[in-house]
Image: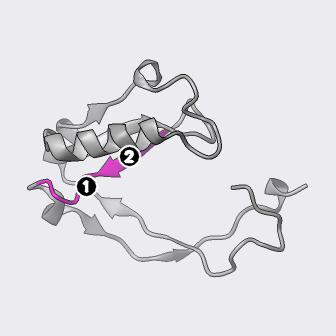
Amino acid sequence: MHLSPEEAPGDLVAVPADIPAGAIESLEDLPGSRLPRNWRAYPAPIALADLGAAWILAGRRAVLSVPSVVIPAERNYLIDPRHRMFGQVRPGKAQVFRFHPRMWK
């Protein structure tokens, strides 16, 4: 985000992950109503980092579902690297990623 086509890196990759069923079953959902009013501001408000840090420190769940800043109706999934189930997450094969040309003006 916030780049012109000339600034976009040419070496991006996307890496899928297989998350164990137990981690998905214990997923924690963070609804938009629990986010600060300005959660989509740029740069991101410090309160968002504080929410994430508190979630990691609590260690309750392996996965946190949060609204996407780019498309709020979509979800992003954060995986706690300190959670006991993290070792069961299996990364897939890295795939070349390029932004679609319609992304740019």
Query: What is the secondary structure assignment of the residue under circle 1?
Result: loop
Q: Position of residue 74 (x, y in %)?
A: 53, 36
In the rendering, at what x and y percent does residue 64 appear?
31, 40
Residue carrying label 1: 19
Taking the image as shown, residue 67 lies to the left or right of residue 80, namely: right
Read off the magenta span: 75-83
Earlier in the chain: of badge 2 and badge 1, it is: 1
Instruction: Please give left or right for residue 26 compared with residue 8 in the image.
Output: left
| Above-or-below relation of 62 to 15 | above
State the residue at coordinates (18%, 45%). Answer: 57
Q: Which residue is mark 2?
A: 77
Dot 1 amino acid type: Ile
Residue 24 drawn at (x, y percent): 23, 42
Q: Is residue 62 above or below residue 17?
A: above
Q: Say whether marks 2 and 1 touch (CB < 8 Å).
A: yes
Residue 51 in the image: x percent, y percent?
34, 37
- Which class describes the residues within 10 Å of circle 1: few (<14), some (14-19), or many (20+)? some
Quadrant occupied by the C terminus: bottom right
The residue type indicated by label 2 comes to Tyr
Quarter residue 28 falls in: top left
**Callout 2 environment at 10 Å: few (<14), some (14 to 19), or many (20+)?**
some
Mark whose residue sits in front, 2 or 1: 2
Looking at the image, which residue is at 40% across and 22% down? Answer: 34
x 18%, y 37%: residue = 25
* Residue 95 belongs to magenta span: no
The image shows a total of numbered marks equal to: 2
- Left or right, 23 with reference to 46: left
